[in-house]
Image: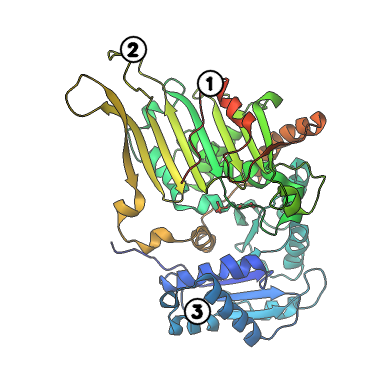
Amino acid sequence: MVARTIPVESFDLVIFGGTGDLARRKILPSLFRRMRAGQMPADARVIACARGKMSRKEFQDLIRDSLEEFIPAPEDRPAELVDAFMDALEFVTLDAKGETGWAELGKKLRADRVRAFYLSVGPSLFGTIAQKLHDHELATPESRIVVEKPLGHDLASAKELNRQLTANFDEHQIYRIDHYLGKETVQNLMALRFANALFEPLWNAQHVDHVQITVAESIGVEGRGEYYDKSGAMRDMVQNHIMQLLCLTAMEPPAKFDPDAVRDEKLKVIRALDPVKPQDTVRGQYRANGEGSYLDHVGNPDSTTESYVALKVAVHNWRWAGTPFYLRTGKKLRTRMSEIAVVFKEVPHSIFPEVSARKSNALIIRLQPDEGITLRMTIKDPGPGGMRLREAPLDMTFADALGDNPEAEADAYERLVMDVIRGNQTLFMRGDEVEAAWAWTDKIIADWEDDHEPPQPYDPGGSGPEDALALMHRDGRRWREVDG
Ligand code: BG6
């Protein structure tokens, strides 16, 4: 299949924190891949800013090494393309809080092209940089500013961040990244729901028994202990990534696929969420004898931060009243697996003998790995011997169905950065959306804090704490297996 790649306009992308981990690991390799795909115009430039002194050549060498590290196969890095990419890179030593470097950055920026500022720095610098860009007259009315989580720690801090950004940039210029929205299958969820007539009539409380959203990770906190221990699974995953999956699953069809139409509908879902009762929440923390415990990994023997959360959530609106959404995410689980399972109600009356295995239909949207869709069906067990039923999957793995399409493999950051340049905010969070998500999250966290109960231990490599199983069992339902 031939990929259709439309080049974006010429641009200057300024990356603050340009020598940092995210820039080296994700943003620059993603841009390189877009250049390789023919989407990044030859005269586009990436201007990295960082506090340390570095020559342009030293910066180019650093990024050459990063490409080798993060795009390991040499055939994916043709030498002439790597050289062309190096030509697009510039470096400015800049002090975000002081005066050094701003004038030099200004001299490098060209008029008549898209200008985007990617703040790949901690949120404490967002406001300062936005202000400096304004004071030095580097931000035009059409410039974009890109920020990424953590977008606050609670509602108050999220509001303050929004205030700082909107003091100098209009909402239409602000691109808040949630990298889950850049994932191919997450976007496919919208295609599945709104480009097929088949599912939408069934997509409601009348036909759907419940929905399960799982983001299971096999990794632990991986050297990010200091950040993670202050955050926990609720703030790190539920407030943002899982909330986005919930919104895309539960939202009404927008009138059109345009940024505000889509984001208005997502916001309505968040606002329709009932406060979650403490008995509908489970917190877990992975524990092992000796090394390998969460407490070791974050270097805090007294930590009560959760590395696992399970919630039973009600979307209080006409479409979903009575259909619970069960959400769970955790680290150090058996395998890496993310999916949305829409479990339908059973047939109202069975005409078949009870000996038959009968399970309700379920539509499983696999986000990663092995992206695809499975529809769980009941069929007749083949052969003579009576009318026995069995379960069979109707399975579509996108890799098989779509053939060898390198574009499908694109990293979330590739799509998102190109969308920034194109000026398309559909896959970015609006300020009010982030705030509404925090308002809902804050209440759950406040209840936990009042409760003083420590998180429930669970074994690394397992499927989470016992209480999470009970959360479903008491409703006569069960989680799908966490397996690969
Ligand atoms: C990040 C979280 O936002 O998402 C991490 O901070 C988590 O803790 C990661 O591991 C998961 O992303 P992905 O794309 O690997 O599912």
In percent of width and height, residue 355 lies at: 32, 17
Task: Kindly identify the amino acid type of the residue bearing the numbered disc 2.
Answer: His
Of callouts 3 and 2, the N-terminal one: 3
Quick one: SS at disc 1? loop
Cα distance in 3D space between marks 3 and 2: 66 Å
Q: Which mark is residue 349?
A: 2
Residue, disc 1: 321
Residue at 41% in and 49% down: 371
Residue at 64% in and 69% down: 15
Residue at 38% in and 42% down: 373
Task: Kindly identify the amino acid type of the residue bearing the numbered disc 1.
Answer: Ala
In percent of width and height, residue 42 lies at: 46, 78
In the orientation shown, which residue stands out farthest toward the left? 384
Q: Which mark is residue 43?
A: 3
Local packing at callout 3 (Cα closer than 10 Å; few below 14, some 14-19, many 20+) is few
Callouts 1 and 3 close, C-beta under 8 Å: no
> Does residue 257 show up?
no
Of callouts 1 and 3, the N-terminal one: 3
Cα distance in 3D space between marks 2 and 1: 23 Å
In percent of width and height, residue 1 lies at: 28, 61
Q: Is residue 67 above or below residue 402?
A: below
Quick one: SS at disc 2? loop
Nearer the observer, 57 or 11 = 57
Residue at 28% in and 15% down: 352
